[in-house]
Amino acid sequence: MASPALKPQPVSPLEFDPTIYHITEGQNGTQLNIDDFCLWYGATQALHNNTLKIERGLVTALIGPSGCGKSTLLRSLNRMNDLIDGLRVSGSITLDGEPLFGPQVDVIALRKRMGMVFQKPNPFPMSIAENVTYPLKIDGVTDRKILAEATEAALRGAALWDEVKDRLDQSALGMSGGQQQRLCIARAIAANPDVLLMDEPCSALDPIATLKIEELIDELRGSYTIVIVTHNMQQAARISDNTAFMYLGRLIEYGATETMFTNPKGRRTEEYITGRFG
Amino acid sequence: MTDITADRPVRTSVTFVRAKGSDVSAVGEPFIWGMGGALAFGVIMILGFLALVIINGLVTFWPKPLEEVRLSDGRSFVGEPVRVETYRPSPDQLSKLSDEVKAKILSDGGFANRSLYRIGNFDFYNNDFQWVADFEVAGRSKPADLYLVERQEWGVFIGKITAVRAGDESLENPTYNQINAHFDEARSLRAERARIERVEIGEINHRLNAGRLEIRRAVLDAGGDENAPSVRRITDKVAAERVDLDRRFQEAGQKVNDVRARDGRFSVSLTEVGGQTKTLPLSSLVRFYQPNKLGPGESLAIYGSRWLEFIIAEPREANTEGGVMPAIFGTLVMTIVMSLIVAPFGVITALYLREYAKQGTIVSIVRISVNNLAGVPSIVYGVFGLGFFAYILGGNIDALFFPERLPNPTYGTGGVLWSALTLALLTVPVVIVATEEALASVPRSMREGSLACGASKWQTIKWIVLPRAAPGIMTGLILAMARGAGEVAPLMLVGVVKLAPELPIDFTFPYVHLERSFMHLGFHIYDVAFQSRNSEAGRPMVYVTTLILIGVVLVLNVFAIQVRARLKKRFQGSQF
C-alpha cells in the first residue's frame, strides 16, 4: 500500500522536465507528426505542448493515469473533439505532411483515413454485413459484388469471417461483446484507412476476448499504423512498439516499449510503471 | 489491532421492534398505500367509464320485448320499456288521485315509480316516448302479434301490420313470412333506384357542371369576352356534349320512374293500437319483427344486422337512425392525413432543434413556446384554422386555380385538408417533444462510430440516429393520433358537418377530395346527443357511437404500436 507521503504533490507546469525521447524508429518513416500541440476545453488546458512522431506501421501505445489527456490526444488525431463546444488548439499535427487542423481541411475525408475503435463496442443497429460496409455506403457504393468482397476482406482482416460468414444478414446486436468489438475493427478496416485509432478497445471485454483483440492487433501491425490508448500496462508492454507516457496533459516520456517498461528514464514514468501512483 | 468488541456493552433491550406511534415517514407503508390507492382510483375511473360505454353500447341493438300497458282510465298504449325511475309527483297530480293511492305514495315519503316507454309512431302521436306512473297502470301484457317496424322515415312504428299488397294481390292480416316474401324484392328496387339517382344521374350532373365551368373558365381566360373565338370553340364543344348528356339524363329519369312504378306495386298498411292506419310503400320499411315472438337465434340475427347497418350504412332521420359509416370514414381519413402532415413537420423541427441548432437562449425559448402550444385551447386552433387555412390560404387557392367556380368556394371553406392541418398544428408539440426525447436517447457512441467512419452529420442522422429514434418518434405519433382523433371543437369550425353526402375519397376523378367537408364521430356524438329532435332517442346512439370512436382510436393505436414494436425489434435489439 502506498503511504500518503508518496502521492505526487500538485505541481506547477514549470516543474515538468522536458520530454524524454528514445523511440524505436520504423523502416517506413513517420506517419503522424504532432508538433507542440496544445488543446483547451474552454478555459481549461487539457494538452500542453505535446511533441511526438508516430511511426508508420508500428503500434504506439498511449498510457497514463485517468484524465492525463491520452484520449484527448487520440481523439484530436481524427478530430472527434470537434463535436465539443469551446474547443481550441494550437501547434500542429500532420498526417504524411498534410496538416489536420486548418480551414481547408475536409474533416470527412480525413476521418476516412483514420479508422477508430471505441472503448465500448458500438455496432450499428443493422446486419453484420451492413455494419462492415457502412463506410462504403457513405461513399455511395451500391454494387453488390463490391460490397460482398469488401465485407469478406474486412471480416477476414478482423479475424471474424469464420465465425460470422453464415449469418451476415443477422443483426449485429446479437453478437457477443468481443465479436462486436472485432466487428467494429472490421468496420474501421473496411474504409481502407492508413491509421487505426483505438481508445481502450479491450476495457469492456473479458480476458479471452481481450486476448483475441491483442492477437488481431499483432496481425494488423505493419499494414496499419496503430495508436492505442490503454489503461492496462501489461497490454501496452505486450503489443506496442513505442509507448508514450502522459501525465496531466504533458508528454513525459516517449520511447521504445521495452526500454520504457524495463528501464524508464523519467522519474514519473518509473513511479507510474512501478505502480506508485495512478 | 485492538479488540474492538472487548469494551463494547452488550445490548440487552429490544431495539428494532417498531414502537407504536412511530413516525409514519419512517415506516413508509402509508405512502405506498397512498400511491397504490391513487393508481387504483385512476384505473377504476377509466374501467368504469369503459364499462359504461361498452355495456350501454352493446345492449342498444338487442331487440327488446314490447309491452301493452292498460291505464286505469281505460286508455292503453304499446311500447318498449326503456327504464324505471323514482320521482316525486307534484301536489297538483296528487290531489287528483284517489285517497288510497295518495296514502300509499305519502307512506313512501311522497315518492312513486314511473316507467319510460318508447312508443314510436311519431307520425301519429307527435311523441316518441311516454312516461307512465305505476299508480296509473291497470295492467301490462306482452301480445305476441305486435310488430316493431323500423322505417326509412318517421322513426319506428309499433303496432300491427294489417295488410300487404303486391300488385293486384292483397292480403289482410298477413303472417310474417307473407310480408317477408316480398320484402327483399321491394328493398332491392329501392336500392336500385338510389343507385341510379346517385351514381348515374350524379355522374351526368357532374359532367354537366364540368361543362358549365369549362365555359366560364374560357370566358375568364379570354378576359370576359363571351364572343372570343376560343370561347366559341369551347361553347360548341360543350353544347355537343350536352345533347348527349341531356339524352342520357332523360333515359336515367325514365329508368328511375320505371323502378319507382315497380316498387309502388308493393305496399303495406300499419295500424297502431288506437286503430289509426297508415299505408306506405313496402320498400320504406328497413326492418320489422315481432319482438315478443323472437327466439334467441332470431334476436341475435337482428342484433347482428343492426350492427352491420350501423357500421356500413349512412345515417337517416337526422342522424338518430341508420349508420355512421361516413363518420367512421371521415374520422379515419382526417386522422391519417393529419398524421401524414404532423409526422414530417414534427420530426424535422425536432431534428433541427436537437441536432443542428446551437443550444442557447433562443432555442430554449422556442422549446418552451412549442410546449406551451400544447396548452392552447383547441377552439383557438379552430378559429385560426378557419381564418388562416380556409379563408386566406383556401381563398387564394380558389382565386388562383378555381376562379370559374367562384363565388362558390372550393378550398375557401372548411374541409378535410384544413381540418387535418389544424389538428396537425394542435398535435405537433407532442410529436416534437417525443422526437426530441428519442433523439437525445440515441447513444453518443453510435453517432461517434458513424462519424469516425467518415460519415457526414446528415448521413449519421439518416442512417444511424433516425432509425434508432424511430420507436420513440412512433410513440409521439401515437399520442398525437389519439389526441387528434378525439378532438371535436376546432373541427366544428374547419370542416365537420352534420351530414356530408359525399365522402372525401370516392370513385370520381381525382378520387381524393380533400376540399370536401366531412363527418366525424366526435361531432356525431355531439350532434346526436344535443342537436337531435329527441335527446331520449339519441341517447343509445351516443353510447354506440362513442363505442365506435373508442374502437377506431384503438385500432389506429394498435396498428401504430405494432409498427413501433417492429421498429424496436429491428433497431434497438438487445442493449449492451
Image (cartoon, coloured by chain):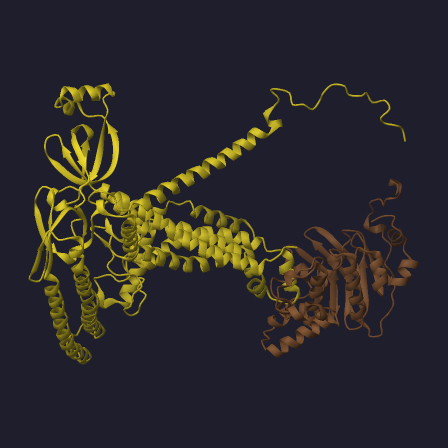
Q: Quadrant of residue B113?
A: top left
Of B19 and B183, which appears nearest the observer? B183
**Image check: B289 left or right of A34?**
left
Q: Position of residue B520 (x, y in %)?
A: 31, 53
Nearest to the observer: residue B474 or residue B443 = B474
Give the image quarter of residue A29: bottom right
Q: Position of residue B333 (x, y in %)?
A: 35, 59
- Tell me the quarter of the image containing the C terminus of chain B: bottom right
The answer to which of A159 and B138 lies nearer the viewer is B138
- Residue A35 visible in this rendered orientation of the protein: no
Q: Is residue A88 left or right of residue B525?
A: right
Asked if A268 appears above or below B513 in the picture, the reply is above
Residue B230 location, quadrant: bottom left
> Total marks drawn?
0
Q: Is residue B504 visible?
A: yes
Tell me if B155 is positioned left or right of B465 in this view.
Answer: left
User: For this view, does B422 lie left or right of residue B96?
Assistant: right
Chain identifier, yellow in the render: B
Which quarter shows the N terminus of chain B? top right
In the displayed structure, would residue A25 be above or below residue B26? below
Q: Nearer the viewer, residue B546 or B186?
A: B186
**Spot occupied by residue A173 in the image (x, y as percentages of width and height):** 64, 60
Which chain shows up in brown? Answer: A
Q: Residue at x 85, y 46 (%)?
A: A8
Q: As drawn, which residue projects farthest toward the right?
A: A263
- In the rendered image, residue A161, in percent from the top left (x then y), is placed at 71, 71
Q: Kindly identify the residue that appears in the image at 32 percent across and 51 percent down.
A: B521
